[in-house]
């Protein structure tokens, strides 16, 4: 999950599609709110979870950078001349060290049902649990393919060509 108001990839997609982004995602290099995705690449910043009131999201994102970037030695920030900035931190839990696994699974299923049974806010059809949108998107893309806008396809094929790789035919 992104610990920011939006994942950086969504800003890149908006840039490639030449679309504006929602207010509250980023600020420009002077700290002003903006809807222009190009402002991010010109020295702007992505806001933390919670936007301009996101001090808790900022704390969470700070710790993710420490665990995923600094601890792994792969860097932080977005300096294109810096380290890769693609570190990962994974925590693995032996659930049975805390409680019986079957009880945990049963209670998780009850929790998901509780969340799904919650009446949605006005203007929404349902309450979603974390990862549910991504799961549905994955199923749809496995069935129908992955849409790629022309600019992203141009970038990918340019990278493949520069690397001497064959470019698969587009559908």
Image (tube, rainbow, N blue to C red):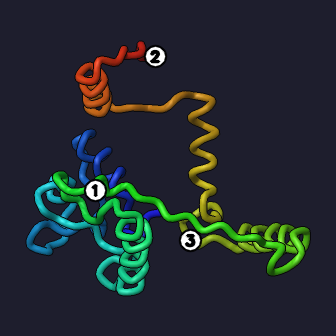
Q: Cα distance, mark 3 to mark 2?
A: 39 Å
- Locate residue 79: give its quadrant: bottom left
Which residue lies under the disc numbered 2?
171
Callout in the foreground (3, 2): 2
Above or below, comparing residue 65 to residue 151 in the picture: below
Which image quadrant is residue 112 in? bottom right
Residue at the spot of label 1:
21
Q: Which mark is residue 170?
A: none
For image coordinates 43% across by 79% down, the residue present is: 60
Q: Earlier in the sequence, mark 3 or mark 1?
A: 1
Q: Closest to the observer: 56 or 85?
A: 85
Rendered view: 54 above or below 72 = below
Residue beneath disc 3: 122
Q: Position of residue 130 (x, y in %)?
A: 60, 64
Looking at the image, residue 42 sits to the left or right of residue 22; the answer is: left
Q: CA distance from mark 3 to mark 1?
A: 23 Å
């Amino acid at each position: 999950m992104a610990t920011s108001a939006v994942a950086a990839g969504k800003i890149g997609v908006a840039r490639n599609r030449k679309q504006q982004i929602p207010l509250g995602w980023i600020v420009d290099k002077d700290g002003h709110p903006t809807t222009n995705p190009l402002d991010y690449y010109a020295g702007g910043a992505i806001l933390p979870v919670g936007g301009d009131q996101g001090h808790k999201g900022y704390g969470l994102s700070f710790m993710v950078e420490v665990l995923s970037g600094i601890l792994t030695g792969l860097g932080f920030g977005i300096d294109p001349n810096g380290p890769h900035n693609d570190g990962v931190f994974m925590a693995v839990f032996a659930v049975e060290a805390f409680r019986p696994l079957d009880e945990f699974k049963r209670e998780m299923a009850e929790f998901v049902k509780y969340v799904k049974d919650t009446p949605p806010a006005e203007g929404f059809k349902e309450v979603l649990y974390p990862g549910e949108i991504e799961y549905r998107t994955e199923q749809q893309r496995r069935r129908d393919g992955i849409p790629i806008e022309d600019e992203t396809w141009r970038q990918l094929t340019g990278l493949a060509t520069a690397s001497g790789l064959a470019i698969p035919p587009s559908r």
